[in-house]
Amino acid sequence: MVKALLAGGVLPNEKSDDGHTPLHAAVIHGHHECAQLVLAAGADIEALMSSPMSNHYTALVFASANGDVEMTKLLSKHGANIWHRILDSMQNTAAHTAANGAMPGNAACLKLLLEKDPRLALAKNSHQRTPLHHAAGSGDVAAVNALLRAGADPNAMDINKSNPLH
């Protein structure tokens, strides 16, 4: 169906009333093949979601936050910016959202991001919190270990002078 719609002239970057492009819809619903098709049709991989629950997320940030390993891999392979910062008060990266450990695949997504650029382990958000602060706070041991192996600073202090153990 997606092939037919794209062939019929559906614009791959047109946003719906809820602020999502076809790529965003594919990511939200975990439709990997659909994501591949809209990317091949010229979808903007860096387009920002503009819905209240995912305001200013890119497809990669959303996929990694939801623990979708295959989608994170696909988007990364297609050149998604792993350093994109969410345009909100926290300024988190995909590594921060993946390190939250709320979803089963988060640690695996984080490992994929760190393989692309281990310096993500040192990324600080607007509160000077690193992905290690997030992983430790959520109790995600696999994410903590991945971040430490990638060179995360276990003594990094946030704006409240708290390290990841606090």
Image (cartoon, grey):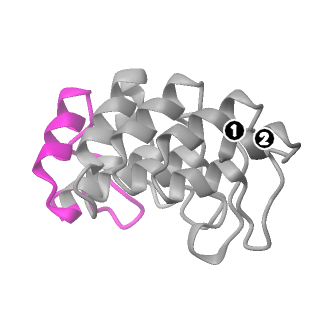
Q: Do callouts 1 and 2 mark residues in contact (Cβ within 8 Å)? A: yes
Question: Which residue is the site of mark 1?
Answer: 3
x, y percentage for residue 144? 17, 45
Amino acid type, mark 2: Leu
x, y percentage for residue 117? 42, 23
Amino acid type, mark 1: Lys
Question: Which residue is the site of mark 2?
Answer: 6
- For image coordinates 67% across by 72% down, the residue present is 51
- For image coordinates 51% across by 23% down, the residue present is 77
Majority secondary structure of magenta residues: loop
- Residue 121 lies in magenta, yes or no? no
View extreme (right): residue: 9
Residue 93 shows up from this direction? no
Q: Is residue 115 shown left or right of residue 107?
A: right
What is the distance, in whole Å, between disc 1 and disc 2 at their CAs?
A: 5 Å
Q: Quadrant of residue 109?
A: top left
Q: Which mark is residue 18?
A: none
Specify start and end residues of the magenta stretch as a single range.
137-166
